[in-house]
Image: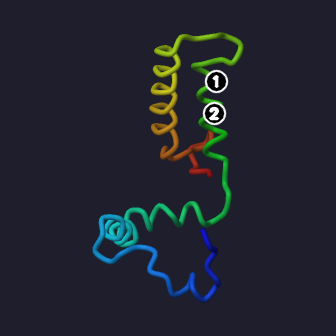
């Protein structure tokens, strides 16, 4: 197969307009929910929530113990529920003032 030059690559129609792939791509680009989610990804690499979830997961599925598949799945479900419940909770200090 012969390689295309830069100008040929720019001019080539890679996706045929009206095809299933084209319609799906257009739908993705116009999806406002996806656009809103992307701003969290593009703000920078922030792994704090992943680390917090992994710590919650270790509470239910310690690394030192071997579990069967069903127990692992259930541990993930419980950890996800706890993480989601606590992630949006407003935090207060001992006196009652809101803190971050």
Q: Residue at x 57, y 85 (%)?
A: 8
Q: Which mark is residue 24?
A: none
Q: How is the image coloured?
A: rainbow
* Extreme-right residue of the structure: 64
Q: Residue at x 58, y 49 (%)?
A: 97
- Between residue 80 and residue 19, name the one nearer to us: 19
Q: What is the number of callouts on the image?
A: 2
Neighbourhood count class around disc 2 (C-alpha, 10 Å): few under 14, some 14–19, many 20 upward: some
* Residue occupied by mark 2: 54
Above or below, 70 against 3 in this view is above
Q: SS class of the residue under badge 1?
A: helix
Classify the position of the N terminus by image quarter. bottom right
Q: Are marks 2 and 1 in contact (CB under 8 Å)?
A: yes
Quarter of the figure with residue 66: top right
Across and down, in percent, residue 36 comes to 44, 65
- Between residue 15 and residue 36, name the one nearer to us: 15
């Amino acid at each position: 197969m012969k390689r295309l030059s830069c100008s040929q690559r720019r001019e080539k129609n890679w996706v045929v307009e009206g095809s299933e792939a084209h319609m799906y791509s257009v739908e993705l680009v116009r999806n406002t929910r996806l656009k809103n989610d992307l701003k969290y990804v593009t703000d920078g690499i922030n792994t704090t929530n992943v680390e917090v979830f992994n710590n919650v997961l270790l509470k239910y599925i310690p690394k030192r113990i071997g579990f069967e598949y069903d127990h692992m799945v259930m541990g993930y479900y419980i950890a996800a529920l706890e993480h989601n419940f606590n992630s949006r909770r407003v935090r207060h200090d001992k006196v009652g003032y809101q803190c971050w």
